[in-house]
Amino acid sequence: MSSGTLVPELSGSQIEKSFSYYETPAGEVDVEAIRNIVTNGHHEGAVVYVVRDAFSPEAATSIVENFDRLTQRTGGGNRQDDSYVKTHQIGATQFSYSGEEYVREVIKSSSESLELFDNVSQEELERVFLTKLLEKTFAEQGVVFRGSRYKNISGGFATLRRWLDNGEMALHPHDDTAQLLAAVKDDYEIATSRHVVSFNAAVQVAEEGGELVVWNLNPDDDCRAGLGLTGTGYPYPIGTLTGLESFTVELGPRDVYFLNASFIHGVASVRKGQRLSAGRFIGQVADDLVVYWT
Ligand SMILES: O=C(O)CCC(=O)C(=O)O
Ligand SMILES: [Fe+2]
């Protein structure tokens, strides 16, 4: 990675060569690509790895039904309006929370989080989230992969989100490293992540729109400070990104992907249909430890 020439508002590191995404079918999951993105931030220049058509239509249908029922019952879900991101959501999110505040949200939403997977078997859940595969892959390198903990309370497993479009983008350009600053406050173990990888499963895809867009910049603290985004990393004004290298990934039904979410990314406007993604964050916090949270 290097620091290239950017518009004055932007600074940070960039992928020098072959900035791109990489994909395989579900039968050929490339664990080295996952390991590279988690440990080194990219796989031969690819900052996204997509596994196509990873799980069954039945599992997707059950999760969407569960989500719709739960958001109706809870009036839009578990995430209060933080005046930043508009979403219907089931599950907690660490954004702007210290470790203690976050795990309290996890506890509060744990019953709904369990209900999200009603009628989905353990075997199917593994195909959606690849948890055992990740445990095995990292174990082979002497690295533990586990859920994050704060004072022995587990962080979330997965959070489901339907981003509520404002017509410009479904989810504005952002980075997911900035929010680690809140975790520093009370030493929540995720705070030392080298970079933040987001994992998402496309439980429901839009008929039109809803693509993932990624820009070739891993912003530094000065960049965030200059734009007034310290601690949030949200939203990078679209105008400042003009001219910055980027790519778009079209997500098919039941695709799952790993993204180095320290790079600026967003979700294109959903022009037709609905989109629902099941996500968690993954971070290497020590040479021998990788943890996840939501
Ligand atoms: O819904 C998505 O596909 C992307 C959401 C996102 O920005 C993330 O998980 O980091
Ligand atoms: Fe993100």
Image: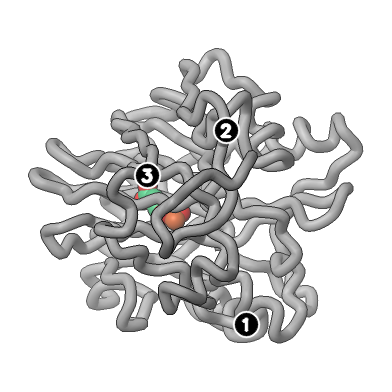
What's the residue type where badge 2 is placed? Answer: Glu
Q: Residue 87's x, y, as percent?
A: 28, 67
Residue at x-position 53% and y-position 44%: 4
Q: Residue furthest left?
A: 272
Ligand 2 neighbours mark 2 (CB distance < 8 Å): no
Q: Is residue 116 visible?
A: no
Picture layout, residue 111 above or below residue 165: below
Considering only vertical position in the picture, is 292 above or below 50? Answer: below
* Residue beneath the point at 58% across and 62% down: 220
Q: Is residue 257 left or right of residue 235?
A: right
Please tell me how many numbered marks the rendered image carries.
3
Q: Amino acid at mark 1?
A: Ser
Q: Camera-side residue: 5 or 106?
A: 5
Q: Is residue 90 visible?
A: yes
**Mark 1 and mark 3: span between their CA atoms?**
33 Å
- Would you name the residue on which mark 1 appears? 98
Image position of 55 (left or right of 98): left
**Which disc number belongs to residue 244?**
3
Q: Nearer the viewer, residue 185 or 10?
A: 10
Quick one: label 1 or label 3, which is nearer the N terminus?
1
Inter-mark Cα distance, 1 to 2: 34 Å
* Residue 185 location (% of width, % of height): 70, 85
Please tell me which of labels 3 and 2 falls first in the chain.
2
- Secondary structure at badge 2 equals loop
| Residue ID for mark 2 | 16
| Lower position in the chain sequence, tag 1 or tag 2 | 2
Quarter placement of the N terminus? top right
User: Residue 89 sits in which quadrant?
Assistant: bottom left
